[in-house]
Amino acid sequence: MTNPIFGFIGCGNMGGALATAARKSLPGENILLANRTPGKAAALAEKLGARAVDNAAIRKIPGGAGGGNPRRTRELVRRFKNEPYPSIAVTVDLLTTGIDVPELTTLVFMRRVKSRILFEQMLGRATRLCPSIHKTHFEIFDPVGVYEALEPVSTMKPISANPTTTIAQLIDGLDYYEDDDDVQVQIDKLVAKLQRKIRSLSDKQLKAAEEHAGFSFEEFTRDLHGDDPQAAKQRAKQQREILAALDEVHANKGHAVVISDQPDELVSHTRDYGGGARPEDYLEAFSDYIATHINEVAALNLCVTKPADLTRETLRELELTLDRAGFNATRLNRAISEMTNAEMAADIISLVRRYAIGSVLLSHEERIHRAVERLKAAHSFSKQELNWLMRIETYLINDSVLNASVFDTDDRFKSKGGFKKLDKVFHGELADIVHELNTYLYDDKGHVA
């Protein structure tokens, strides 16, 4: 709410001129441009550093909207109230009464009115509380001077002329007043500020703040409002530090970030393996988990006994099961790297097989590259076949598992004709090639699973 958003319909002489003028005092991201021709909005947005938006985001809702059909007009108002678009409505008189949109935070007056009652009806559109967006105030932009002209006779006055005034500033301001009437005005501002702050906090934030203070803020505010002016003044000043601390608590964001200009100092560092375990303990726990769950978790058993039968789904199931138990490839590789002083980037299949049957541990890419090279050495492939093998190697590096069904389900192969076309490239032997490649992928130095 401290950074108002202005929307302009049309990018011709009037709309373009207004947007250009607004850009002189507003950041570009706060200016939205819409036009029936999206290209015109985009061109002006680029020139001004503003944002072009969908034409539906900013909507004129005159009294004759929808061809004068009242039902169509109500539908436009309903959309403004309940739907993302339009988020900015431009209207004449239509929305002065009979509409309730608590989320309204900004009013812009573009023409002068002489009626105090009509003016207050317009203001009333934005006075509704809205806890869901932590609304504490609304803003008025008045380039035509209607507020200034009618303020002397208006019965609607802001509680605080500046909604950004802090609780601490309101309490400190009490020192400038001695007359009971002046003190009471300042106390009323403080009470209103405290009430808005209390409503904006979550239950957890309010509970934490009250535990720190040692009293209920709602009761304190109620008592403050009921005291005579001088007693209220003393009560507020006595609790200044505790009340001022509320300025640092922001709705749903916790406490403000504390910035220090002191130099940083590294005290210590450690790796997280869950529960403060050392890397060797983490790897031992992983080995124990595999040994005790290999016959209980189907995907784990398949990885150890028939890895060539793994699919994307079963591999994902394996990863999720291990993650729930506190194990993942990143932590396991980090622990191995710390234990061996050598960088390791093995995939979860290799890690499971290493701690289940003692497979030689290779990095993910190295394991795949070695298998493809063994396949090439065993055959005399044509240039076209070698090109497809390169694509298959790239696929494996990204997806880890390969079977015949992949060629008809993955777009990288399906778009090229799928299994049937690739099988012709490999002279009807694609299924055998895939089987042989998987054999090399999981060949554990003579112990083929």
Image (cartoon, rainbow, N blue to C red):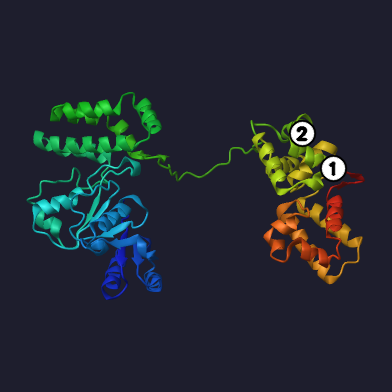
Q: Residue at horizontal 32%, vertical 62%?
A: 58
- Please name whichever residue, 199 or 242, is drawn nearer the observer in this view of the structure: 199
Residue 282 image position (x, y, % from top left): 72, 34
Instruction: Please tell me whether mark 2 or mark 1 is closer to you in this view.
Output: 2
Task: Kindly report the distance in space between the C-alpha atoms of the residues bearing marks 2 and 1.
Answer: 14 Å
* For residue 225, side relative to residue 356 (left or right): left
Q: Residues within 10 Å of mark 2 (few under 14, many from 20)?
A: many
Q: Amino acid at mark 2?
A: Ile
Q: Who comes first in sequence, dot 2 or dot 1?
A: 2
Residue where numbered disc 2 is placed: 290
Residue 204 image position (x, y, % from top left): 40, 31
SS at mark 1 in the image: loop
Number of marks: 2
- Please name whichever residue, 132 or 145, is drawn nearer the observer in this view of the structure: 132
Any part of residue 32 in sight? yes
SS at mark 2 in the image: helix
Q: Residue at horizontal 74%, vertical 39%?
A: 299
Quarter of the rendering containing residue 25: bottom left
Quarter of the rendering containing residue 359: top right
Any part of residue 179 in sight? no
Vertical comparison of 51 with 432: above or below? below
**Mark number displayed over residue 289:** none
Residue at the limit of the structure toward the top, as seen here: 214
Residue at the limit of the structure toward the bottom, as seen here: 13
Q: Amino acid at mark 1?
A: Ser
Residue where numbered disc 1 is placed: 359
